Image (cartoon, helix red, strand yellow):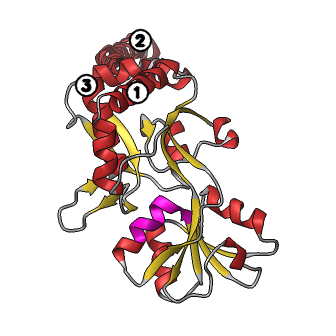
Amino acid sequence: MNKMKRLPLLVLAALLVMLAAAGCGASNNPGGDADAGGDGSANGGEGGGQTEAGANALEAIKERGKVVVGVKFDTKLFGLKDPGTGEVEGFDVDIAKAIAKKLTGDEANVELKEVTSKTRIPMLNNGEIDMIIATMTITEERKKEVDFSDVYFNAGQSLLVKKGSPIRSIADVTKDTQVLGVKGATSIKNIEDRVEGLRVKQYENYQEAFTALRAGQGEVLTTDNAILYGMAQQDSNYEVVGDIFTDEPYGIAIKKGEAELVQAVNDILSELKSNGEYDAIYEKWIGEKPPAE
């Protein structure tokens, strides 16, 4: 009898447990769907799940109303952050603002993120930035990882030394010369190809390398001449010597497969050059008119 009396109670308890579980599921699922939908719509605004598969980055920028650009924060003349104001200024920054204005209607619609020679390609391919405008030389090796715009600046590799140094050109650099450079830059390989057995110390960014040169940790710092001129402006005890010994055409890097964005950037660069805006930016930062193409 006792077993018989307990049976309905057990059945009732089981039913209550089932109903409770169903109720929890009903209350949680809409929240879960809403979260999933929210993520989807947010991603959709940025190109959705297609972004990872190479969606239309140009449309994503226009929908977002902002261009996210990777620039240097440590390179005078091209991208240097003022420690007092927090503003980042330079040739590359002004090119980024001009592109933002053409794509969104206002140059203020640009977000600048710091990149180095080492971090810029990973940040682009991870989706952290839309493009790289950061003294980046177009090379066949890099074309395997990113797509490039047309050339927007022509530089060449040179040498920075303390005034009075016996090193006056690449011909004076030997395997016993302590050379300084930056990780991820093409300049290291270029000079190693020219001087067998060369000793090179590599730093994370240009300011670290220049600080090391000033501290006597090396005899010469090598990279693109345009960057070195900026360093020489910072400290008149240093000078750029010798002719350039490489051609370093800078391009704007964009994630592979984003043909529409590459074309849009190329069209903007062409317009900037034809309407005089490019010349004005060049003269502002380089101090002379750009060479004839």
Q: Residue at coordinates 57% horizontally, 23% vertically from top-left?
A: 257
Q: Secondary structure at mark 3?
A: helix
Frontmost residue, 186 versus 229: 229
> In the image, residue 186 lies at what x, y percent?
63, 56
> In the image, residue 87 lies at what x, y percent?
22, 56
Q: Nearer the viewer, mark 2 or mark 1?
A: 1
Which residue is denoted by mark 1 in the rendering? 270
Q: Which residues are magenta?
A: 223-231
Q: Is residue 238 left or right of residue 26?
A: right
Q: Is residue 71 visible?
A: yes
> In the image, residue 86 lies at what x, y percent?
22, 60
194 to 128, vertically: above or below: below
Mark before the other along the chain sequence, 2 or 1? 2
The type of residue carrying mark 1 is Ser
Which image quarter holds the N terminus? Answer: top left
Q: Is residue 76 left or right of residue 203?
A: left
Frontmost residue, 148 versus 205: 148
The type of residue carrying mark 3 is Thr
Frontmost residue, 71 versus 153: 153
140 to 167, vertically: above or below: above
179 to 247, vertically: above or below: below
Q: Residue at coordinates 69% horizontally, 39% vertically from top-left?
A: 140
Q: Residue at coordinates 59% horizontally, 84% vertically from top-left?
A: 219
Which residue is denoted by mark 2 in the rendering? 11
Which residue is denoted by mark 3 in the rendering? 104
Q: Is residue 253 visible?
A: no
Within-10-Å neighbours for mark 1: few <14, some 14–19, many 20+: some
Rendered image quadrant of residue 178: bottom right
The residue most toward the front is: 292
